[in-house]
Image (cartoon, rainbow, N blue to C red):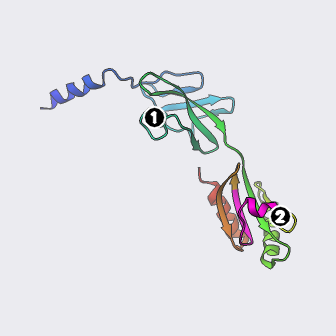
Amino acid sequence: MRRPVVLLIMAWFSGHVFAAVNTDTTTFQANSRVIKSFSDEHGETTKHIPSIKKFDAGQYFYSQTLKYHDFVWSCKEYDDGGQCLDLTRSPRPPIRLVSFVHDRNDQSKIQADLVLLYNQQNDKKIELINLSEDRTARSKYQVSTLPVVVIVRGDEEIARKTGLETRQNMSNWIKHELSKP
């Protein structure tokens, strides 16, 4: 019974291409569509490369972009059957850490000191915005409670932490949020 089923499956898949052809940017593993390495003007990498199959016709990301780690990935070229043949990527906007405080808020004064300490000990700096000086930031970032730390990529808010935290808790929260893809 198994032999006819195997032959039927082989006949059904005989017209499909299972192995991808290397391109100027993408190197595939032998006889597969698994990407071994990717190289472009942003450098060469063997890590954090999305599966090319995610961009095939009928898949969720078909003809769309995928935000994956520090890059936005998309399919550069499709074959007649809707299979993605090559990828392209562009850098995502940088991440900004922003803390909002106000002169008349006691917790904000403590938060400002914590931000200064954090900035002395870390490479990724927190931008401190005093809402008593910058009145447009309150509506732009929808700040209703102080103090607050917001993580922003481009114009998109990634995470928000409201209230006063210890320096260690704030550092741990920032590291946790920045480690997400």
Residue 63: image x %, image y %?
Answer: 52, 34
**Is 138 included in the stretch rendered in magenta?**
yes
Q: Label 1: which residue?
A: 53
Residue lying at 44% horizontally and 21% vertically, measured from the top left: 80
Residue 70: image x %, image y %?
Answer: 64, 43
Range drawn in magenta: 135-151
- How many neighbours does mark 1 have within 10 angstroms: few (below 14), some (14-19), or many (20 or more)? some
Q: Residue furthest left?
A: 1
Residue 67: quadrant of the picture: top right
Residue 102: image x %, image y %?
Answer: 82, 71
Q: Secondary structure at mark 1?
A: helix
Q: Residue furthest bottom?
A: 106
Residue lying at 84% horizontally and 77% vertically, measured from the top left: 104
Q: Which mark is residue 63?
A: none
Amino acid on which the number 1 mark rests in the picture: Lys
Residue 33: image x %, image y %?
Answer: 45, 29
Q: Is residue 40 above or below residue 141?
A: above
Q: Residue furthest right?
A: 133
Amino acid on which the number 2 mark rests in the picture: Arg
Ranked by sequence position, the earlier of labels 1 and 2 is 1
Mark 1 to mark 2: distance in Å?
47 Å
Q: Secondary structure at mark 2?
A: loop
In terms of depth relative to the viewer, which is nearer, 90 or 45?
90
Q: Label 2: which residue?
A: 135
